[in-house]
Amino acid sequence: MDTLGASTSNTDFSSGLSAEVHAAERDDSESFLSVTWSIRNDGGEDVYFDWPTGDSYLYSNIPYSGVTATSSDMAKRFHPVMDSTDACLCSGVSSLDFKERIGPGEQVAYWSMFPVPADVNEIHLEIPGFDPIEGIPIS
């Protein structure tokens, strides 16, 4: 997978993990941004990656709702899109291939959908437990 940016753990609970962004692509209407990102387990034991939840909105499916994007000038923060059932449009328990346990040496891809305006050309991705991944170009 290509990498547009990477980050390391910044807390004890994410120790031994690293994060990467692989794609940031707009939809045809230029209203939404889909970001594909992953977590790699560089440690020697299984890790349960189910804690990056958000507390700004009451999503019905909690995992990964805490992953946010900011405009490169940090003027705007974008939370994942919420659908009509209050579910986060992001990887989560309703996905058929959802995986929260990451084995040693394994890298697992996830995704998030954000309402990013067409005039924003670059974002920073913030995954709880990791330093921000900055300067991600939008295609």
Image (spheres, helix red, strand yellow):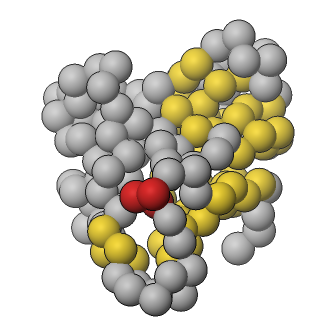
Quadrant that contains the N terminus? bottom right
Task: Report if residue 102 is visible in the image.
Answer: yes
Of residue 106 and residue 60, the one placed in the foreground of this image is 106
Residue that appears at 66% across and 41% down: 132
Question: Quadrant location of residue 122?
Answer: top right
Residue 91 coordinates in the image, percent (x, y)? 37, 53
Question: Quadrant location of residue 73?
Answer: top right
Q: Tell me how many marks there are.
A: 0
Residue 97 coordinates in the image, percent (x, y)? 32, 71
Above or below, 124 relative to 15: above
Residue that appears at 22% across and 23% down: 58
Residue 35 coordinates in the image, percent (x, y)? 59, 46
Task: Report if residue 106 is visible in the image.
Answer: no
Residue that appears at 73% across and 32% down: 123
Quadrant that contains the C terminus? top right
Above or below, 35 relative to 69: below
In the image, 77: left or right of 104?
right
**Name of the residue lying farthest toward the top:** 75
In the image, 117: left or right of 11?
right
Above or below, 70 relative to 42: above
Residue 66 coordinates in the image, percent (x, y)? 40, 36
Residue that appears at 53% across and 87% down: 105
